[in-house]
Amino acid sequence: MLKLRIGSKLSSVRDDRKLNQVEMAELLGISPSTYSRYERNENSVEFDLITQFAKILQIPVQDFLPETTAIHNNHSGQGGVIFGNFYYYGNKDQIVLDLENQVKLKDQEITFLKEKIELLERLNGLK
C-alpha cells in the first residue's frame, strides 16, 4: 500500500480552514494524538486516509501528492508507480485492484458532491 508523509501540507491546509488538530481528529474518527503524529510526519499516511483528508478539507487529493509521477513495469509482471521519492510496487493484478478501489472511492466522492450540490441548489431555491 502506498504511504506518504504529508504533515506540512496537512497542517497548512488545516490552519487555512480554521480547524484545530482536535477538530480534525474528530472529523476523521481518530485520536488527536494519532492525528498529531501525521502532521509531525511521525506516521506515514496510507492513500485511503489521504482521500479522507482531502474530502474534509475540500481540496483535490492531488494537492497531497508529489508533483513527479512515473509508472514502472518489467517483463515479469512486477511493476509500480513512483510518486516523487516514494515507490509503490506490487504485481500487476494487485496494482490494478488498488487502482480500481481508488476509482470506486472517486465515484463515491463524485456522488456525494453531486448530492451536496443538489441540496444546496434546493436550499437556495434554484431547483
Image (cartoon, rainbow, N blue to C red):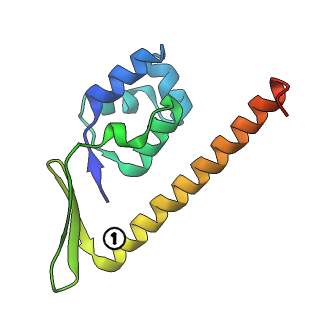
Q: Nearer the viewer, residue 83 or 89?
A: 83
Q: Nearer the viewer, residue 93 or 21?
A: 93
Seen from this angle, which residue lies furthest front? 126
Residue identifier under label 1: 95
Residue depicted at 72% across the width and 42% down the height:
115
- Label 1 sits on a secondary structure element that is helix
Q: Is residue 124 above or below residue 52?
A: above
Q: Is residue 5 above or below residue 8?
A: below
Q: Is residue 42 above or below residue 75?
A: above
Is residue 80 shown left or right of residue 116?
left
Residue 53, x across and y down, in percent: 45, 36
Query: Looking at the picture, which amino acid does disc 1 mark?
Result: Ile
Seen from this angle, which residue lies furthest top? 18
- Which quadrant: the C terminus? top right
Is residue 14 shown left or right of residue 110?
left
Residue 70, x across and y down, in percent: 20, 59
Residue 92: quadrant of the picture: bottom left
Residue depicted at 78% across the width and 31% down the height:
121
Q: Is residue 27 above or below residue 86?
A: above
Residue depicted at 58% across the width and 56% down the height:
107
